[in-house]
Image (cartoon, grey):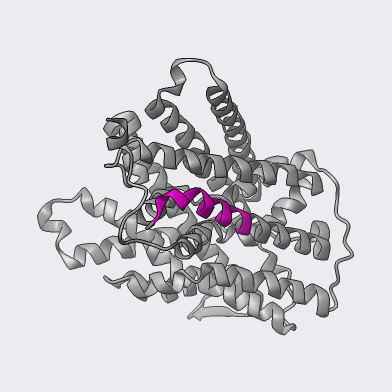
Amino acid sequence: MASELRTPLTQRTGSSFLKACFNGTNAFLGIGLLTVPYALSSGGWLSLAFFFLIAIITFYTGILLQTCMDADPSVTSYLDIAERAFGKRGRVIVLIIMNSELYLVSIGLIILESENLHKLFPKFMIKLGTLIIYGRESFVLITALIILPSMLLTDLSLLSYVSATGVFSCLIILVSIFCVGAFGGVGFSSSGKLFDLSGIPTAVSLYIVCFAGHPVIPSIYTSMRNRYQFSKVLMFSFVLTTITYLLTACESYLMYGDNVESQITLNLPTSQISANIAIYTTLLIPITRFALMMSPVANVIEGGLSEELKNQRWVRLLIRVALLVSTTIIAYVFPYFESLMALIGSIFVVLASFLLPCLCYLKISGSYRSWNLTLVGNVAIIVFATLAGVIGTYSSIAELVQNY
């Protein structure tokens, strides 16, 4: 009976091992690459101990999600895992968490685009009669106009293919930064600081953002042709992701020390070709990913409408435009990228990548019924994640209030 309940380990169709590795790496390598140098500069070299600890924990919680799916063949998504563990209420809670994270990350994409455009064109402004909009604020509006056509598309398949090049984009940025340091006259002579306790909450929150791909893990697992290889796929993805983040953080910190900006591209000299390659590669990320991230949020809103309204094209377009307008307004008023990313990490990634996998596993497996090594390990992760989440959230909100 137990064997009948397990998910089949092989299937005739599905992703190959290499494709699954690519999808897994693409799920974790993202805009965290731009903020991880700032995280290192905030906490100092010894904060890398937290970076490695977070990488190990999130790899383990990824395996926990696989175990939850193996317990029931009908479970095919993160939402299904939550429902299997905690019923409909659990599904709704996870749905809110996932879409809130997507909404906030979308705001971060607009800020990211506008600040890098301002880096390239610092003297740009918009004049509308007597109204003058300077600098970064003007690029927030321009970014919204650039993204608008993609929000009006009903078929996002083309954007999904372009967005899938995220792994290569991150590697291009990594190499470009190295070229600026090695051949652009910047060098790698900054020693930085060993440890800064006051910066640890920000550092930990931004390190957590680097491993925020857990909601995608069930989809990668169910799409694999040979599911018994999943642990190897996850290991490959995490090793490549960890190395890429680590190299970017270290080379950037050695180049700029404690002067690292919230996005490493803002430090790069625009007179260097390699720097421009990194900046222009970064500019592609919001354009290709914004609509893809907002689509699930729009779909949830549409799902709450009547059948007559949800099938109206103008209603669907109105919802997507409203989402773009609202995120643009927030990005215009609160342009604090590092604080926003830290807030996302300390609340939503902590929930999706730390707490929920442990809680769902304990509930589905029944391991919570008696004390054992597995229970102790999961409780330790829950305690660590809770502390990181509470302290990181307080620190991020305090920084936002102070900056505003």
The residue shown at (77%, 76%) is: 180
Q: Of 90 and 107, which appears nearest the observer?
A: 90
Left or right: 151 as drawn, with respect to 358: left
The residue shown at (28%, 51%) is: 300
Left or right: 349 as drawn, with respect to 84: right
Question: Where residue 156 sits in the image (x, y, percent)?
Answer: 33, 70
Quarter containing the N terminus:
top left
Can residue 346 be seen in the rendering of this structure?
no
Q: Which residues are magenta?
A: 226-240
Q: Is residue 173 above or below residue 121?
A: above
Q: Is residue 174 magenta?
A: no
Q: How many marks?
A: 0
Which residue extends farthest top?
A: 370
Question: Where residue 245 sits in the image (x, y, percent)?
Answer: 66, 58
Question: Where residue 296 sits in the image (x, y, percent)?
Answer: 33, 56
Question: Where residue 53 sits in the image (x, y, percent)?
Answer: 67, 41
Classified by dominant secondary structure, the portion drawn in magenta counts as helix
Q: Is residue 228 magenta?
A: yes
Left or right: 126 as drawn, with respect to 204: left
Q: Of 367 and 307, which appears nearest the observer?
A: 367
Can residue 19 be seen in the rendering of this structure?
yes
Q: Is residue 206 above or below residue 80?
A: below
The residue shown at (27%, 33%) is: 88
